[in-house]
Amino acid sequence: MAVFVTRRIPAEGLRLLSQASGCRVQQWDSDEPVPRAELLAGVAGTRGLLCLLSDRIDREVLDAAGPGLKVISTLSVGFDHLALDEIKKRGIRVGYTPDVLTDATAELSVALLLSACRRLPEAAEQVKSGGWTTWKPLWMCGYGLSDSTVGIIGLGRIGQAVARRLKPFGVSKFLYTGNSPKPESAAEFGAEFVPLTRLAEESDFVVVTCALTPATQGLCNKDFFGRMKKTSVFVNTSRGAVVNQEDLYEALAQGRIAAAGLDVTTPEPLPTDHPLLSLRNCVILPHIGSATYATRSTMAVLAAKNLLAGLRGEPMPHELQL
Ligand code: GLV
Ligand code: GLV
């Protein structure tokens, strides 16, 4: 059974595949993305594919793989990079890595929120550049979480873990929006299910933790940012495409909102001359939500287990229901 692994991954995951009997592993053994031509050649005749969120697995790839491809295992909780309709049509099973990255991603979301609202990168830069001349009462002030209202877009696994971490900072009210109310999840925080417009208008901090779907694409747009308070902070750790970036740029540049923290952008990486990077009130990270050593290792093991279970026709630890 030939499997193709599209990148260098934590050793624990690769070892499981290499040591599995009957499994023949081919890998794009690099930290850089596999070139499209190499991907198309690499998947040809394979039974299993272990891919990353940065690999677009569309019809062309599935055609190149041929009818023998039975399992796709993605090293991610997100699956917007997979052409699920095509995959389903061909009877291919899909594994993914929820749960194991929830804590790391929630932690990063909180770090990014605090970095943006307390202006940490900007302040640290002042120390290095000599801009710090003395203690000034009116300098480098930002916004804190005490008595604030936090609005969460997508109160799923990660959204709840973010709320759980923010609560002890003194947040007085949680709002959330999504496909439908989740009373059981919301009860822990007394979170109120509200329309997106009200969430925008009342939140001091907006945190986006929803999946990217046709329904959430471009959800945070000019109207949304226009409703936010001038003193509010926007944080996105889900997918860049949930945000209309031009609208976000204008809101930040014109001071319509106070600041933003983004772990995800469109595209990734963002070109170094992108307008968003010129803003002092926008903190941008290179999609590192799940990037702790332990979490990435656990993700690799889970992705390998999903792949092997799929190849053997067994239930996967985490299979996407198509
Ligand atoms: C990260 O963005 C993931 O989907 O795992
Ligand atoms: C701050 O360091 C203070 O003493 O108020």
Image (cartoon, rainbow, N blue to C red):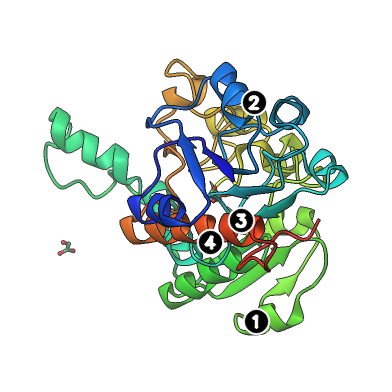
In which quadrant of this rendering is ligand 2 seen? bottom left
Residue that carries the numbered disc 3 in the rendered image: 96
Separation of residues labelled 4 and 1 (CA atoms): 37 Å
The location of residue 223, given as percent across then percent down, is: 76, 39
Separation of residues labelled 2 and 3 (CA atoms): 31 Å
Three-letter code for the amino acid on which mark 1 is drawn: Gly
Q: Which mark is in front, 4 or 3? A: 4
In the image, which is nearer the foreground, mark 2 or mark 4? Answer: 4
Distance between mark 1 and mark 2 Cα atoms:
34 Å
**Circles 1 and 2 in contact, beta carbons < 8 Å:** no
Marked residue nearer the N-terminal end (4 or 3)? 3
Instruction: Indicate which disc, 4 or 1, sits on the residue closer to the N terminus.
Output: 1
- The kind of residue tagged 4 is Lys
| Mark 3: secondary structure | loop
Residue picked out by circle 2: 246
Q: Residue 3 vs residue 86: left or right?
A: left
Secondary element at tag 2 = helix
Image height check: is 72 above or below 143? above
User: Residue tagged by mark 1?
Assistant: 190
Q: Is residue 261 visible?
A: no
Q: Looking at the image, which residue is at 41% across and 27% down?
A: 32
Callout 4 secondary element: helix
Mark closest to the chain's N terminus, 1 or 3: 3
**Horizontal arrangement in the rendering, residue 180 relative to residue 111 (left or right):** right
- Label 3, residues with CA under 10 Å away: few <14, some 14-19, many ≥20: many
Nearer the observer: mark 4 or 1; the answer is: 4
Q: Quadrant of the C terminus?
A: bottom right
Q: Is mark 3 within 8 Å of ligand 1?
A: yes
In percent of width and height, residue 111 lies at 38, 56
